[in-house]
Image (cartoon, rainbow, N blue to C red):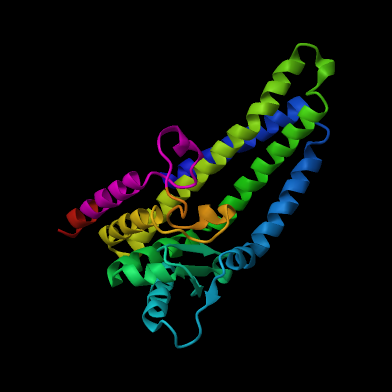
């Protein structure tokens, strides 16, 4: 279901792009599509290097953290993907992220704080969640969504700059209104895709580790700590982390959140745990 929702949102995002392009700059639409795709293709290829540099993550040397490395190897085997590279991020906030343009270039990074406060079951649950992002190719999905959203924003800026088709009479006002609203709508849809991928990673990760309650317990600890312990990172990296490093949003602000509500994530994992227990019996 989460996979279908992601595909639906990508389809809506594409429809907004085509509609806006037809209103504002139909002849220039291919140009902006190419520009957006090139920018996001570059980000896709070099995203791992950029985010590792921004978070000051350091590679785990051979022989260090053998227990964590063994968990990563076991989970990668269960997921049917190559073993990702393992990095540690300096900082007391417990958090983690995965990056890499495909499973062959996967990276899992965990903070020092994460290794300090989680027990073995919870740590395995978090690593399984990150492994799920790599298995589900979420970096690719995010890159596609970002490319389309960027093209929409470029088109909107061009439409506003050139007056949104003033030669179309009354239609110009509608074009201008769409040029103003389309980037906001595109951003909301892009963030919606990000939240759906988090739900999917929770579900896939729960199956990989076979312990949804362990992941739920870890998320609860991480959510609590993220609101109290700062993490030195750029806002642009927030969507990558398993929990928002800057805390969660409430009410209407949740529409602009990169992560779904923590209460709902935990509830879904609890339901999944009950279902798995029922099947086992």
Q: Name the quadrant of the C terminus.
A: bottom left
Q: Which stretch appears magenta?
A: 248-274
Q: Name the quadrant of the N terminus.
A: top left
Q: Is residue 25 visible?
A: no
Q: Between residues 150 and 138, which one lies in front from this camera angle?
A: 150
Left or right: 224, with 144 as reference point: left
Vertically, is 147 above or below 81?
A: above
Q: Between residues 231 and 252, which one lies in front from this camera angle?
A: 231
Left or right: 220, with 260 as reference point: left
Q: What predominant SS class does the magenta segment belong to?
A: helix
What residue lies at 51% left-to-right and 39% top-to-bottom? Answer: 256
- What is the total number of numbered labels drawn onto the structure image? 0
Q: Is residue 67 visible?
A: yes
Q: Whole-percent x and y of residue 261? A: 38, 44
What residue lies at 79% left-to-right and 33% top-to-bottom? Answer: 158
Q: Quadrant of residue 41?
A: bottom right
Left or right: 271, with 72 as reference point: left
Asked whether 251 falls inside the magenta stretch, the response is yes
What residue lies at 56% left-to-right and 52% top-to-bottom? Answer: 235
Q: Whole-percent x and y of residue 9? A: 53, 39
Vertically, is 150 above or below 198?
A: above
What residue lies at 60% left-to-right and 64% top-to-bottom? Answer: 54
Q: Whole-percent x and y of residue 74? A: 38, 75
Q: Whole-percent x and y of residue 34? A: 77, 47
As drawn, the residue found furthest toward the bottom would be: 63
As drawn, the residue found furthest toward the top would be: 170
């Amino acid at each position: 279901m989460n996979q279908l929702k992601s595909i639906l949102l990508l389809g809506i995002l594409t429809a907004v792009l085509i509609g806006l392009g037809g209103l504002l700059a139909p002849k220039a639409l291919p140009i902006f599509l190419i520009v957006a795709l090139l920018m996001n293709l570059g980000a896709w290829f070099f995203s791992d290097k950029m985010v590792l540099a921004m978070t000051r993550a350091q590679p785990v040397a051979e022989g260090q953290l053998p227990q964590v490395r063994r968990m990563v190897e076991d989970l990668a085997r269960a997921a049917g993907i190559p073993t990702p590279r393992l990095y540690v991020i300096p900082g007391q906030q417990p958090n983690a992220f995965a990056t890499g343009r495909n499973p062959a270039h996967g990276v899992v990074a965990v903070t020092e704080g994460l290794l300090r406060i989680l027990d073995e079951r919870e740590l395995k649950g978090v690593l399984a969640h990150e492994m799920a992002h790599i298995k589900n190719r979420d970096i690719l999905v995010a890159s596609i969504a970002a490319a389309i959203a960027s093209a929409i924003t470029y088109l909107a800026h061009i439409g506003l700059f050139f007056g949104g088709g003033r030669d179309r009479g009354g239609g110009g006002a509608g074009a201008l209104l769409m040029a103003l609203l389309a980037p906001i709508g595109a951003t909301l849809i892009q963030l919606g895709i990000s939240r759906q991928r988090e739900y999917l990673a929770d579900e896939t990760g729960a199956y990989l580790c076979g312990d949804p309650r362990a992941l739920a317990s870890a998320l609860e600890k991480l959510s609590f700590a993220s609101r109290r312990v700062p993490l030195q990172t750029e806002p642009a990296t927030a969507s990558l982390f398993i929990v928002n490093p800057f805390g969660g949003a409430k009410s209407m602000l949740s529409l602009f959140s990169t992560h779904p509500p923590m209460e709902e994530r935990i509830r879904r994992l609890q339901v999944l745990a009950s279902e798995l227990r029922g099947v086992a019996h």
